[in-house]
Image: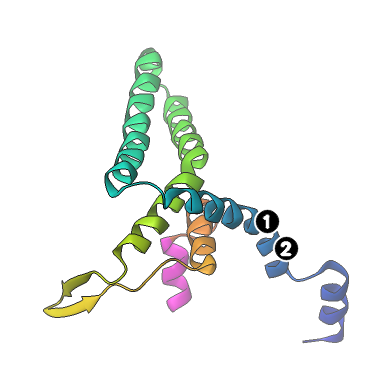
């Protein structure tokens, strides 16, 4: 690292540190919500997730119905896309926490994977939640990952 880079980094800080500072509140909220889910039964957790999914479908249909006169307009698809993003953003914390809790509930379960018995032993780490939030926000996509491989 050049002297100039060291000075700039010393003054402005590392980008990764800034990114983590922005993402940490999401992880904290996910983990806080996750803690509240342990008291639910498996069926209650399924209902909670299903209601989010159903709410999304109903809200999307309502949006389409209220904008059906404009459905040929190019702007319609931008508005629909924004509506979908806004809804999913509003439920991200809850959905990530549900997935983490579902993983916790599966610990010690046995599955056959490619002909071999495997024991589930994973509950999402904070760094995995950060990766999920980054992917959800579109800050890194599949094409970017492919390019990184080459």
Q: Position of residue 136 (x, y in %)?
A: 48, 52
The label shown at residue 22 is 1
Q: Which residues are magenta?
A: 142-150
Residue at the spot 42% in from the left edge and 22% down from the top edge: 73
Q: Quadrant of residue 118?
A: bottom left
- Mark 1: few/some/many CA within 10 Å (<14, 14-19, 20+): few
Q: Position of residue 87 (x, y in %)?
A: 47, 35
Q: Position of residue 34 (x, y in %)?
A: 48, 53
Residue 146 higher or lower than 135, as above or below: below
143 magenta-colored: yes
26 magenta-colored: no
Is residue 114 rendered to the left or right of residue 15?
left
Which image quarter is the C terminus in? bottom left
Residue 48 higher or lower than 138, as above or below: above
Main secondary structure along the magenta-highlighted residues: helix
Q: Quadrant of residue 104?
A: bottom left
Compute the Cα span from label 1 to label 2. 6 Å
- The answer to which of 62 and 143 lies nearer the viewer is 62
Residue indicated by mark 2: 18
Q: Secondary structure at mark 2?
A: helix
Q: Secondary structure at mark 1?
A: helix
Q: How is the image coloured?
A: rainbow
């Amino acid at each position: 690292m050049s002297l100039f880079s060291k000075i700039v980094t010393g003054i402005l800080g590392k980008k990764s540190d800034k990114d983590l500072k922005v993402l940490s509140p999401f992880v904290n909220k996910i983990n806080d919500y996750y803690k509240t889910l342990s008291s639910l039964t498996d069926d209650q957790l399924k209902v909670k997730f299903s209601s989010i999914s159903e709410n999304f479908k109903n809200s999307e249909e309502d949006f389409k119905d209220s904008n059906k006169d404009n459905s040929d307009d190019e702007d319609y698809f931008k508005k629909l896309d924004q509506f979908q993003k806004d809804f999913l953003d509003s439920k991200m914390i809850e959905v990530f926490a549900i997935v983490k809790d579902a993983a916790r509930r599966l610990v010690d379960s046995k599955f056959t994977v490619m002909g071999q018995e495997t024991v589930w032993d994973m509950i999402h780490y904070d760094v995995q939640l950060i990766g999920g939030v980054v992917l959800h926000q579109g800050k890194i996509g599949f094409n970017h990952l492919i390019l990184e491989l080459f």
